[in-house]
Amino acid sequence: MTAADAIVLAGGRASRMGGVDKPAIVIGGRSMLDAALAAVSSCVHTVVVGPHRPELPPEIKQTREVPPGSGPVAAIGAGLHALGSAAPLVVVLAADLPFLSDWSVTELIRHACESGAEAVFAADESGRPQYLIGVWRRTALAAALDGLDSLINQPMKALIPADSAIIALPGVADCDTDEEVRQARASVDPAPPLSLDEARNILRDNLSRLTTYTADLASVRGAALAAPLAAVGPLPRFDVSAMDGYAVAGDGPWRLRRDIGFAGGQRPVGLLSGEAVRIATGAHVPDGTTSVVRDEFVRVTAEDSLHRLPDTPIRDDVRRRGEDRQPGDLVAPQGTPVTAALISAAASVEVTAAPVRGPVRARIVMTGDEIRSEGPLHAGQTRDSIGPILPELLSLCGIRTADRVHLRDTPNGFDQVLAAAPECDLLVIVGATGGGAADQLRAAVDRSRARVLVRRLRLRPGGSTIVAELTTGTTVLGLPGNPFAAVATLLALAPAIVEGRTGGAPRRALLGPLHNASEIAGPVARIVPARFAEAGGWVGDPHIRTAHLGGLVDRDGLVIVPADAADGATVEFLPLPR
């Protein structure tokens, strides 16, 4: 088949949609621009005409019509100029065709080759020609553009050659209005629920990384290193005593001096052969020291003579300068979470600040008119039993809570919450994730043009969980409203969100046997409370009520039970804070 280049028109003002970036609208899990690029993936060269999009790979050329917004003819002219002279055919597509397939483009190319027409265009199901879904002979397209006095604000019909053909193709309906976008989204088959492992991997690999900055490590627990951390100074910084005892020079017995070496104190004067000095653990050993002899290995005579006890082992007990770390040695690789251990290890080699991402800052949004956090309850109200504990649970996952707010059931409440999302890295929204009359989160996420990564989970409880990324980069974690379902899903997914946002290394799962797995397992994975078993592993609770957290009292954590698991099956354990 004859080779083709591609021009994808991704500009325009979308005036009938309030001026939104129409190519970036997500339908069926991908943007309309991504759909257009997938349809022309077999083309030799591709140029996108419109605002610069830094997320596009470098092999895709980008250009802009002059002036911006001067119509499709001007955009096609700019695209053809950016392509240069190459393939004999040119595919021209608008980036508002969510269901266009590569098969449709191949059919247009095939028809152009067989018919010999100067241009071939698609027709939608009503028979209406779609002049922005076509394949041109490059020479014919160049001639049509050259034949116009001006390209600015020209209608597409001004370009159409007499020798053109139109063929009916499926999936060529465009989206020009909000209602057409809504109908297109409604027509897409919902993505099947994801397993917990699938969801975690998607979040780790596809969430946008937080900005890298240099910070004092002691102040950013929960962040992750954005670069490898190397030692600046040696460890130890100098030769130090590894034990309480005596620094000695040469073979004994030794003459014991009166001075003493303390950690952090003045270094004793150098030893001559046959001399010894009392020294404490961590003290800088004096010059001339050949070894440190432990207290329990010696005796001191009345004449201040130091003797090694018979049959005691000969040991050095001196930690030599740099024996643990030399300057430049790797302390921790990129992606290591900033923990107490890392802060301490870094400080010991004179590193107190480093490039990091994070920690993730979260806003908690409790939803529903029926929820009341304080004050007396009125008819139909219930106490907010999980909002107050969510900051502690988020902290367990390495997330800092910035604030907690309550959202009433209003038509545009979620739109306002999502619009204010740039103030945080993560929105944790509890409730309104299902399909009930008051469950408006999913519709608001769609209206926000968010990229949905997890639509639903193949998990009980927690199946209605949704995770999306707003155009601002903020992650939205929508949790079920039932307290146990919310807590269980949060503990299962939040670490993967942190790893995705910070670039942190995935946590190692805590695995072990569940002794009564067959009593709990069902057709899909389940999360239930569990306690440690004396023989090792865990015993899970077969029955759990999700409307409160009473089932977590006197339990050590949660277990994720695979579908149809047998007794003794290996499960993942999620510890609860004590």
Image: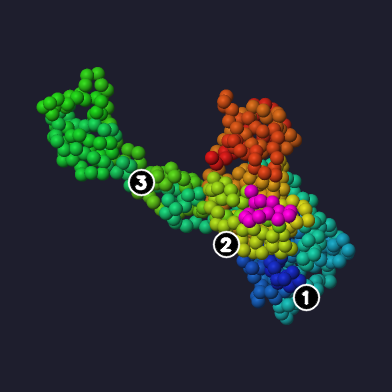
- Observer-nearest residue: 365 or 140? 365
Among numbered discs 1 and 2, the one appearing first in the sequence: 1
What residue is shown with label 2?
Answer: 423
- Image location (x, y in percent) of residue 90: 73, 63
What span is in magenta?
A: 371-385
The quadrant in which residue 560 appears is: top right
Label 1 close to label 2 by CB (< 8 Å): no
Q: CA distance from mark 1 to mark 2?
A: 43 Å
Figure quadrant of the N terminus = bottom right
Query: Of the residues shown, which amino acid type is indicated by label 3?
Result: Val
User: Is residue 454 visible to the viewer in this orientation of the structure?
Assistant: no
Q: Is residue 41 above or below residue 152?
A: above
Residue sitting at x 66%, y 55%: 376
User: Residue 148, relative to residue 378: is it above or below?
Assistant: below
Residue 91 lies, with reference to residue 501, above or below; the image says: below
Query: For residue 349, which numbered disc appears in the image?
Result: 3
Q: Name which of mark 1 and mark 3 comes first in the sequence.
A: 1
**Circle 2/circle 3 CB separation < 8 Å:** no
Disc 1 residue type (three-letter): Pro
Chief secondary structure of the magenta portion: loop
* Residue 268 in picture, x, y percent from top left: 18, 40
The residue type indicated by label 2 comes to Glu
Q: Quadrant of residue 564?
A: top right
Q: Which residue is mark 1?
A: 155
Q: What crowding class fits label 1: few (fewer than 14 Cα within 10 Å), some (14-19), or many (20 or more)?
A: few
Q: Is residue 378 located in the magenta-colored stretch of the structure?
A: yes
Which one is in front, 7 or 18?
18
Kindly identify the residue that appears in the image at 57 percent across and 38 percent down: 575
Kindly report which numbered mark, 2 or 3, lies closer to the viewer in this rendering: 2
- The structure residue drawn at horizontal position 42% and vertical position 47%, both measured from the top left corner, is 343
